[in-house]
Image: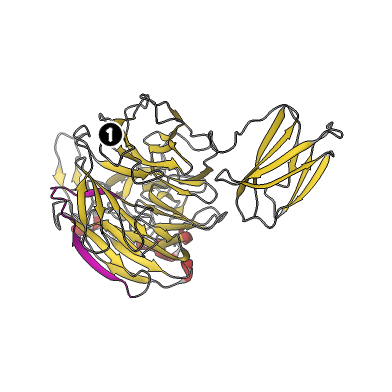
């Protein structure tokens, strides 16, 4: 409704609405704003999905913005969908700012019948990512992410803008094929998927399923080219089913398959096991009410087993991280007021609570260190936290948000080849870091030995300079990210030049030993 009072709120009169009221404010619980011209009470703006204004006290309205301009790179009438705030500059009838799901917009001729709007989001980072996908090729900085009402964006090394949107709507789960980087998938609400070949250049194949929940959890089995998603609706439609798409990317088939889990709620997390038998898919599936299932033979006729604990809270399972085998699992919950982290080392026969000193807050994702399942990173309501030892009864969690913020993080993705981690924040965009060694393989210790190593990153030639070392003998070892020795030599000069172009492109640790002193440094080969 639009109501008007001329006696300071003692009495109200219902006014006319813009044409098609079911369209203009169809999400009034989420997006609805009104503001009156400080110089003219008959001129006011009202926004729902788009912006409207009236120049005659509400007798008629003009539809002045069009959210669909986001698909054409903007335009004079473009304000992003879903209006939250309208503010006139004090004393001005023309200068107005608007807050929407797409950030801040501005006009300097707001009293005109058809104002011109300008986007004002430069350096204003509020992108709310639900999901992200990290490119599988080593040292490749191309990533995807699904956004609240801003589609799915493709990041290619430059600041994100509207032209990087490769799919519209509310961006949901997205994936790269880990075995074929030319194949990728994006989706928006209710399991509506688009499959691409040849990266972002292919036209892809669309499938409009309309099942599951709004941002419906999913995972992709790159070994068998099968996509699995939650098939259950918010109101119990398609109960105990998975959405399954086989034979991706070509001639793929879609089925809703029964799981036999026998629950009355939807699935909130799906994780494909990298330890699945050849040609088969094993899944770990969590529910909105704290259930946890291991589902085998998911590629054919699923067989489910409840592997959760009676000690689990009746809360939403947000993630199942898989360690060095299917016996090692870390399960997280995204509710307040519950024990939010649980671990098993025997496939679910017994569970231990591992929240430790973590504050009471939602935990939304978890990943183990790929070489050491006693260490983990979690995504929380207050940024990213890490633990160095999950074997102790009360683990110590530490925030690691340098360069980010204490911001909600919805998802973490890890590329094992170079230990790059991609964090999808819900309000501050995407961030990356490297999950460094922590008591794995080689100690990353730095002494007072003065060493210069470069260039870093390198395209193959690495120069080492150790001043004041004279003719002392130096032992040189280089390790890959798995802690394996890939190069060993010794030298007795101040300078040493290495030719490493024969090594795969990756991150390596260079360790130099001279007498009782050690020096280690991480170097990137491109």
In the image, the segment drawn in magenta is: 251-270
Q: Residue at x 40, y 64 (%)?
A: 71
Q: Is residue 32 left or right of residue 108?
A: left
The residue positioned farthest toward the right in the image shown: 470
**Based on the displayed image, in which of its 4 quarters is residue 78 positioned?**
bottom left
Residue 317 or residue 39, whichever sits in front: 317
The residue positioned farthest toward the bottom in the image shown: 251
Q: Is residue 121 left or right of residue 101?
A: right
Q: Residue at x 27, y 40 (%)?
A: 348
Q: Judge whether 267 appears above or below 334 on screen.
A: below
Disc 1: CA contacts within 10 A as few (<14), some (14-19) or many (>=20):
many
Q: Is residue 335 left or right of residue 77?
A: left
Residue at numbered disc 1 = 351
Residue 26 or residue 470, whichever sits in front: 470
In this rendering, does residue 501 appear at all? yes
**Based on the displayed image, in which of its 4 quarters is residue 251 positioned?**
bottom left
Q: Position of residue 317 (x, y in %)?
A: 27, 42
Q: Residue at x 47, y 60 (%)?
A: 164
In this rendering, does residue 116 appear at all? no
Secondary structure beneath disc 1?
loop
Q: Judge whether 90 appears above or below 141 on screen.
A: above
Residue 75 or residue 198, whichever sits in front: 198
Q: Residue at x 23, y 53 (%)?
A: 213
């Amino acid at each position: 409704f639009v109501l008007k009072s001329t006696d300071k709120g003692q009495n109200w009169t219902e006014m006319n609405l813009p044409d098609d009221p079911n369209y203009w404010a169809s999400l009034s619980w989420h997006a609805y704003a009104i503001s009156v011209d400080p110089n003219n009470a008959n001129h006011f703006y009202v926004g729902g999905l788009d912006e409207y204004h009236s120049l005659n006290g509400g007798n008629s309205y003009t539809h002045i913005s069009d959210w669909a301009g986001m698909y054409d790179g903007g335009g004079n009438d473009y304000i992003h969908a879903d209006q939250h705030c309208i503010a006139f500059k004090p004393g001005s009838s023309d200068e107005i700012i608007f807050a929407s799901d797409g950030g801040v917009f501005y006009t300097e001729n707001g009293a005109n019948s058809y104002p011109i709007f300008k986007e004002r989001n430069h350096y204003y980072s509020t992108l709310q990512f639900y999901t992200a996908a990290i490119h599988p090729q080593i040292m490749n900085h191309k990533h995807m992410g699904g956004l609240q009402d801003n589609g799915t964006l493709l990041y290619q090394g430059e600041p994100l803008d509207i032209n990087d949107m490769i799919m519209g709507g509310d961006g949901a789960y997205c994936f790269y094929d880990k075995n074929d980087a030319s194949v990728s998938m994006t989706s928006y609400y209710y399991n509506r998927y688009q499959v691409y070949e040849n990266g972002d250049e292919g036209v892809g194949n669309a499938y409009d399923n309309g099942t599951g929940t709004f941002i419906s959890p999913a995972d992709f089995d790159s070994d068998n080219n099968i996509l699995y998603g939650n098939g259950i609706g918010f109101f119990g439609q398609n109960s105990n089913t998975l959405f399954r798409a086989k034979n991706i990317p070509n001639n793929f088939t879609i089925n809703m398959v029964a799981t036999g889990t026998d629950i009355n709620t939807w699935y909130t997390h799906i994780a494909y096991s990298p330890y699945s038998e050849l040609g088969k898919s094993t899944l770990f599936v969590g529910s909105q009410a704290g259930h946890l299932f291991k589902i085998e033979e998911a590629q054919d006729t699923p067989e489910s087993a409840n592997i959760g604990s009676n000690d689990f809270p009746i809360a939403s399972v947000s993630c199942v991280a898989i360690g060095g085998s299917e016996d090692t699992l870390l399960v997280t919950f995204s509710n307040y007021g519950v024990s939010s982290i649980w671990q098993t080392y025997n496939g679910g026969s017994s569970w231990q609570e591992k929240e430790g000193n973590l504050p009471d807050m939602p935990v939304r994702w978890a990943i183990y260190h790929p070489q050491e399942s006693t260490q983990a990173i979690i995504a929380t309501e207050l940024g990213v936290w890490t633990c160095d030892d999950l074997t102790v009864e009360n683990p110590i969690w530490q925030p690691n948000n340098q360069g980010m913020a204490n911001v909600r993080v919805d998802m973490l993705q890890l590329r094992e080849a170079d230990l790059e981690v991609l964090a999808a924040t819900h309000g501050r965009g995407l961030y990356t870091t490297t999950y460094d060694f922590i008591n794995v393989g080689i100690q990353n210790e730095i002494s007072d030995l003065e060493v210069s190593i470069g260039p870093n990153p390198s395209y193959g030639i690495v120069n080492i300079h150790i001043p004041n070392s004279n003719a002392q003998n130096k032992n040189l070892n280089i390790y890959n990210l798995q802690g394996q020795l890939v190069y060993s030599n010794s030298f007795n000069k101040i300078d040493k030049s290495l030719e490493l172009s024969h090594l795969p492109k990756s991150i390596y640790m260079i360790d130099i030993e001279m007498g009782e002193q050690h020096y280690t440094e991480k170097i990137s080969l491109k």
